[in-house]
């Protein structure tokens, strides 16, 4: 049985459809319960097995309640997809502490909380067990201007996931990092679920122009969510460390690591 946080739309809902198509029972969890119910209903309409649950990944108690409810209603989790995420845009020098708190609380701490909530019941189960963390190509490429808060959260998430993979390997629990790039989703509308206590975030026209220009230079096309998750089941079966969605990103990764290797070469001179 698989649990998918952020399962109400975008990549999370696509992961749910993908796994249900592989024959798994899926528990979709999201802060937007109506969207989550609709996503689960769509899976059931196609003959799959899916249930919807409410969760707020910024709240440890909400995730702990989810873990208890899922196990009681449909069984223990054997596959956790920690997918919930938000996009905080804007230049670093214009971002408030509240902007940082929101983005890190969802993207980084939300992942950590999700694993802490479900890992105990995963450890009690026999058979194959796996964790998929939805990170981002931004976790490998920090150069994207006007989204530095998001980039930072994703780099930290990558470090967490790779370390978790090493630590859980001896227990037979696999960990994979899903690295999407431009994907059709509602992540650009993330602020709709920003807590009111943090106030609104202000994105300037200059921020948007900088971001749009950078995306154009990268030449990365946006793909559908179902296409983005096409290799998730295979990645789980093979216990892949990374699952990539966009082959068009390869030249950007090569360029980054070539520059790093050049730094090593200079150190040897």
Image: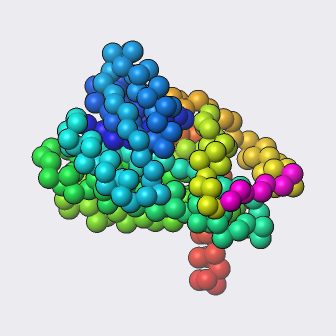
Q: Position of residue 148 (x, y in %)?
A: 68, 62
Quadrant for the N terminus in the image = top left
Q: Is residue 243 left or right of residue 68?
A: right
Residue 120 magenta-drawn? no
Q: Is residue 32 left or right of residue 98?
A: left
Q: Which residue is at a point 53% across and 50% down the rendered structure image?
A: 85
In the rendered image, the residue lying farthest to the front is: 197
Q: Position of residue 127 (x, y in %)?
A: 15, 44
Q: Position of residue 43 (x, y in %)?
A: 39, 22
Quadrant for the C terminus in the image = bottom right
Q: Which residue is at a point 77% across and 70% down the rendered structure image?
A: 93
The part of the chain drawn in magenta is 199-205
Q: Is residue 67 left or right of residue 254?
A: left
> Does residue 256 appear anywhere in the picture?
no
> Does residue 206 appear anywhere in the picture?
yes
Q: Tell how many labels.
A: 0
Q: Which residue is at a point 30% across and 38% down the rendered structure image?
A: 2
Seen from the viewer's position, the closer of residues 44 and 260 is 44
**Quick check: 20 above or below 208?**
above
Q: Is residue 138 left or right of residue 81?
A: right
Kindly report the secondary structure that dominates the magenta region of the rendered protein.
Answer: loop
Seen from the viewer's position, the closer of residues 186 and 61 is 61
Q: Quadrant of residue 243?
A: top left
Residue 201 magenta-drawn? yes
**Quick check: 37 above or below 102?**
above
**Quick check: 122 above or below 108?**
above
Q: Which residue is at a point 52% across and 57% down the rendered structure image?
A: 107
| Colour option used | rainbow
Q: Position of residue 172 (x, y in %)?
A: 20, 54
């Amino acid at each position: 049985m698989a649990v998918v946080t952020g399962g109400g739309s975008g990549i999370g809902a696509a992961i749910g459809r993908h796994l249900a198509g592989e024959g798994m029972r899926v528990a979709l969890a999201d802060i937007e319960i109506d969207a989550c119910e609709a996503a689960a209903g769509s899976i059931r309409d196609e003959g799959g097995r899916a249930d919807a649950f409410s969760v707020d990944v910024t709240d440890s108690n909400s995730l702990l309640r989810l873990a208890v409810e899922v196990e009681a209603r449909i069984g223990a989790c054997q596959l956790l997809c920690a997918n919930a995420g938000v996009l905080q845009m804007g230049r670093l020098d214009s971002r408030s502490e509240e902007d940082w708190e929101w983005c890190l609380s969802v993207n980084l701490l939300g992942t950590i909380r999700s694993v802490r909530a479900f890992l105990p019941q995963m450890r009690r189960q026999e058979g194959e067990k796996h964790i998929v963390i939805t990170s981002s190509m931004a976790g490998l490429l920090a150069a994207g201007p006007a989204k530095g808060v998001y980039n930072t959260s994703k780099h930290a998430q990558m470090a967490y996931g790779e370390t978790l993979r090493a630590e859980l390997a001896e227990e037979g629990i696999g960990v994979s990092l899903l690295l999407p790039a431009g994907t059709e989703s509602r992540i650009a509308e993330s602020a709709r679920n920003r807590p009111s206590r943090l106030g609104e975030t202000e994105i300037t026209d200059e921020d948007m122009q900088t971001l749009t220009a950078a995306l154009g230079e990268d030449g990365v096309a946006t793909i559908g969510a179902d296409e983005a998750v096409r290799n998730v089941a295979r990645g789980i079966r093979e216990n892949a460390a990374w699952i990539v969605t966009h082959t068009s990103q390869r030249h950007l990764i090569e360029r980054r690591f070539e520059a790093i290797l050049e730094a090593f070469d200079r150190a040897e001179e």
